[in-house]
Image: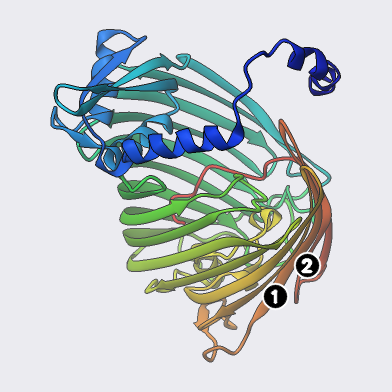
Amino acid sequence: MGYVATVRQMPKIRSCITNFENPEQLNAKRKIFREKVQVSKMVYNKIVIQGVNPKMQKFVSKSISNKGKPITFKQLKRQYFRLMADEKIKSAYPTTKLDTASGKYTLTLNTKRDKHLFFDIGGNLSNRPISNFFLAVQYNHIGKIGFTAYANGYLGKLNSSSHTKLRFEFPTKIPFYIEPSFTIARWDYYKSSALFYDFEKPAYLIQEDLFGELNVGAPVGNIGKIVLSGGVSEWRNKYYQADQFTRLDTSDVSIFDFGYGQLSYQINTLNRKQYASEGTNILVRAKLVSGVERYYPGSTALDTVQVINGPGHDWFNFKITIDKYIKPIKYFKIGVFAEGVYSSQDFFRNYQASILSAPSFNPIPESQTLFIDDYRAHQYLAGGLKAIATPYKNLDIRFEGYLFQPVYSIVKAKDNDANYSTAFLYRHILGMGSLVYHTPIGPISVGVNYYDKNENSFSFFFHFGYTIYNKKSID
């Protein structure tokens, strides 16, 4: 409406302008200015921070400057955009002025900090019993170092969890952060199943995750980061080894107490946290795991010993994920997805415990809300294509298809132990067709998922909100 009103008043606006610049003369002036000011040779020897308190001035200055040494325009550009990516900084308007005596430049940053306290309220409304409520609070502070305190909580039938963390940011020449965190989560795949949902039966699969973690991270360029992590966890699974059970039966309980260390590298330029259509996400991760298993047989188990302690499990896991989008023509995009996992992980006490701890392939949003054995393996290769049409702004029509190829599929033996199949014997496909509208508060999506060789291969879904959860320690 404002644009239309301005167009209507354009003749009156033009009548108020008495000095019109000839376009050719203006272009000539611009050319002379560009030749005079060679950006590649610009050097800054002074940086002035305005608009914030002295402690924050030091933080911003350390984030931008090179320990008081002159800084080139190329270096300044990289540091400036890195500063603007900090969510504690609301704005930093730059002004450049030439010092004719030295031939170098002074940069003035009129800086505004963002508010201290943030609240996030959200969740997911679904046609399946996986709806949840989400609440998060974050406190930001900038002194000589940056500090962030964050806590969130999910509440739903599928997932109830809480994640808290503290983050300390150090604006050194190579900036880095230290981030301790704590997570507690409970996953109930039985109550969230549309096929078996029944309040009167005990849940056939409950996962409980309790872990603390310490991350040390640093940027690699302006779009990548490298993170060194370590943590300890108690991973608890409750399940039945028989398909038929009653409320009088007791479930098996497998507990894996373990420690881990991992190194990850990630580049992420995706335009959305879910249902992305532009950018690239590359994740490379190496992880070492060492722990001890405890097993408590239930009434449906073949084991009769009350408690079985051990054995120990040690393994190495390597994972690489690539998710990239290209735009061949207007209003249409193609996404390319590839993932590979290698794990030296051995088998747990029985098939169910082994498959519960195996790496999983979950490329579509709703797949992480289901527990399907076929999409889990210790080593696998997977890939897929996405076709995305955008006929109207914020409205996407998406079709996605993926192939999951385990190197050795994990199969159940007659005694409920786990075994490997012949190499590359089985493979599975999954896909999704959906209509997604991106509202200011979250996506509305409706469509159909497909999982091959499942009892109900097709599933209809409706979601309003994000299907995103706190991460698991064993992933």
Q: Does 80 appear above or below 393?
A: above
Residue at position x 52%, y 73% in the image: 377
Spot occupied by residue 87 in the image (x, y as percentages of width and height) = 45, 27
Q: Which mark is residue 174?
A: none
Labels 2 and 1: the sequence-earlier one: 1
Question: Which residue is located at x 34 percent, y 48 percent?
Answer: 221
Residue closest to the eye, 267 or 250: 267
What percent of the width, then of the height, locates residue 376? 57, 70
- Residue 257 percent coordinates (x, y): 36, 52
Residue 337 picture quarter = bottom right
Residue at x 38%, y 47% (from the top left corner): 233
- Alpha carbons under labels 2 and 1: distance apart: 8 Å
Q: Answer few, some or many: residues within 10 Å of disc 2's Cα (few below 14, many 20 plus, some between 14 and 19).
A: some
Q: Which mark is residue 429?
A: 1
Q: Residue at x 66, y 53 (%)?
A: 277
Pick the front one: 59 or 187 = 59
Front position in the image: 334 or 314: 334
Secondary element type, mark 2: strand
Quadrant assignment, res 386: bottom right
